[in-house]
Amino acid sequence: VQDSRPDIDEDDELSTLASLFVAADHLHRSLSFAAVTRTLRDVLIELIGARSWACFVADGTFPAPPERGRNQNEGARPKLRVCAGEGVALDEREFEVGKAITPLGHLVERTFLTGERYLATGDLREAPRAALPLQIEGRTIGALVVVEFFPQKDALTALDHKLFDLLSVHAASALLSASLHQRAAVRHASKPRA
Amino acid sequence: MSREYACLIVEDSPMMRQLLVFALARVKNVKVTEADDGVDGLRKLASGRFDIILTDINMPIMDGLKLVKRVRSDPAHKDVPIIIITTEGAQEDKRRALELGANAYITKPIQAPQVIAKVRELLGIEAP
């Protein structure tokens, strides 16, 4: 049988598939919010090479998702807040949609409102470098931002792009599931016993 | 009968450990034992014979540098090859680990072919 894809290196392909499988597997393996954000951190830092990053989620997403279309409702201006991240300044961790004042805030806001991915072109040392919409069933609930990469990282690889695809759709549902579970556990624990 | 090699992976991230286990599953006759941090690594080293150690540097409780130092000062394991796994940019960690007696380093993000090649090289296993 002839190989129909002779240009694809089998080792690289297996390595890529293993990374994608492990990332998705660990994102959905636990209902602990801390474990999910730990996996998110590991994917961004250990697999992609991000030095600083932040996961912004819109108000009302946790513990219950906002109704469809609320993001685009001009009357309701949700706040975007960091629910996990490293290396992001305190004054950039929360802002109202439409009132961002920093380049990071503008990027998060734009990603949240448009649902479009942003990847900076050119020098990877300029911040912020990448923003991904966090989506559940096509609805954007926040944004994941890579503020800086490690200095040695000079280009994004094919695996980085595939991991971005994966995070965009899997991180939001994993975070939401963990948040709902956490909330239910707190409610259950606070119920008076008969 | 071909020889079996015992490999100890010391890494606090469950995700990264699984990725290393997947990579090493492609090296014939390598049996992997996992440890969460340096202390767990020393405990597992004390309970068995290992042919190679792969360790992360940044870990809670006992980091990879301390582990390398402890392994090299232990007569039972002082000659076991050690590969350290570092984050990009951690030049000082790399230098320090090699000074302490690590044999090689791999920089994250981990590429399975690189891990496989380094393990084969240090164990003297020929590529198929």
Image: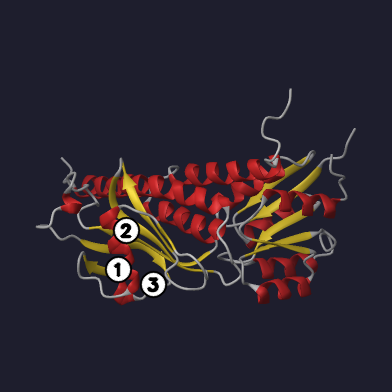
Give the residue pinned by disc 2.
Answer: A111
Q: Position of residue A32 (x, y in %)?
A: 38, 49
Residue A142 lies, with reference to residue A94, above or below; the image says: above
Quarter where residue B75 is shown: bottom right
Query: Are marks 1 and 3 in one subunit?
Result: yes
Please name the residue shown 30% across and 50% down the image. A179
Q: Give the distance between the C-alpha atoms of the residues marked 2 and 1, in whole angstroms.
A: 9 Å
Q: Which chain carries label 3?
A: A
The quadrant in which residue A84 appears is bottom left
For the residues labelled 2 and 3, the Cα–Cα distance comes to 17 Å
Q: Of residues A179 and A8, which is closer to you in this image?
A: A8
Figure check: B79 above or below B9: below
Looking at the rendered structure, the secondary structure element under dot 1 is helix
Amino acid type at circle 2 is Thr
Which label's residue is closer to the chain start, 2 or 1?
A: 1
Q: Position of residue A112 (x, y in %)?
A: 28, 57
Horizontal and vertical percent for residue B117?
A: 78, 51
Which residue position is annotated with label 1?
A106
Q: Which residue is drawn at 25% across and 62% down?
A: A80
| Residue sitting at the far right | B1
Mark 2 nearby-residue class (10 Å; few <14, some 14–19, many ≥20):
many
Residue under label 3: A88
Q: Is the Cβ of the residue at disc 1 closer than 8 Å to that at disc 3? A: no
Please tell me the numbered disc located at residue A16. Answer: none
Q: Position of residue B42 (x, y in %)?
A: 69, 59
Label 1 and label 3: CA atoms lie apart by 14 Å
- Tell me which amino acid carries mark 3: Val
* Between B61 and A68, the one nearer to me in the picture: A68
- As helix, strand or loop, the secondary structure at mark 2 comes to helix
